[in-house]
Amino acid sequence: ALANVTTQNLNYGGRLRVNPGNAANSVLYLKVIGDAAVGGAGGRMPLGAAALSTDQINAIRDWINAGAQDN
């Protein structure tokens, strides 16, 4: 489960893996953009691979902001 589940990494400030309606406070989104709050560029997902495209990142952001529906 991703939505409404608190990450187990204590360094991430109790953020949810996916906070429906709030990509800016969702670990998944922060990891794909390489945000400093969740490890910065060195912790960017996918680990060991090229960064996702802008379109892919925007799709994740939009999905989360739209409520992260499981459909």
Image (spheres, helix red, strand yellow):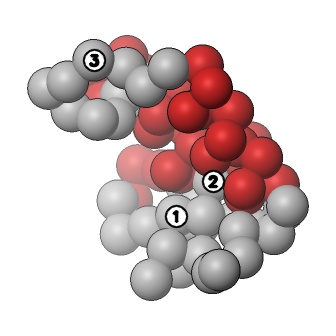
Residue at 29% of width from left, 35% of height from top? 46
Residue 54 screen position, x and y as percent: 60, 19
Residue 62 screen position, x and y as percent: 77, 46
Pair 3/2: label in front: 3
Cβ atoms under marks 3 and 1 closer than 8 Å: no
Residue at 34% of width from left, 35% of height from top? 45
Q: Is residue 61 above or below residue 20?
A: above
Q: Is residue 18 above or below residue 22?
A: below
- The picture quadrant where one finds residue 24 is top right
In this rendered view, identify the residue nearer to me: 24 or 46: 46
Cβ atoms under marks 1 and 2 closer than 8 Å: yes
Mark 2 nearby-residue class (10 Å; few <14, some 14–19, many ≥20): many
Mark 3 nearby-residue class (10 Å; few <14, some 14–19, many ≥20): few
**What residue would you read off at disc 1?**
17
Query: Helix, strand or loop at disc 1?
Result: loop
The answer to whether 9 appears left or right of 12 in the picture is: left
Cα distance, mark 3 to mark 1?
21 Å
Mark 1 nearby-residue class (10 Å; few <14, some 14–19, many ≥20): many
Residue 36 screen position, x and y as percent: 50, 24
Query: Helix, strand or loop at disc 2?
Result: loop
**What residue would you read off at disc 2?**
26
Q: Is residue 60 above or below residue 58?
A: below
Residue at 72% of width from left, 57% of height from top? 64
Q: Earlier in the sequence, mark 1 or mark 2?
A: 1
**What residue would you read off at disc 3?**
50
In this rendered view, identify the residue nearer to me: 38 or 71: 71
**Residue found at the very far left of the displayed protein:** 48
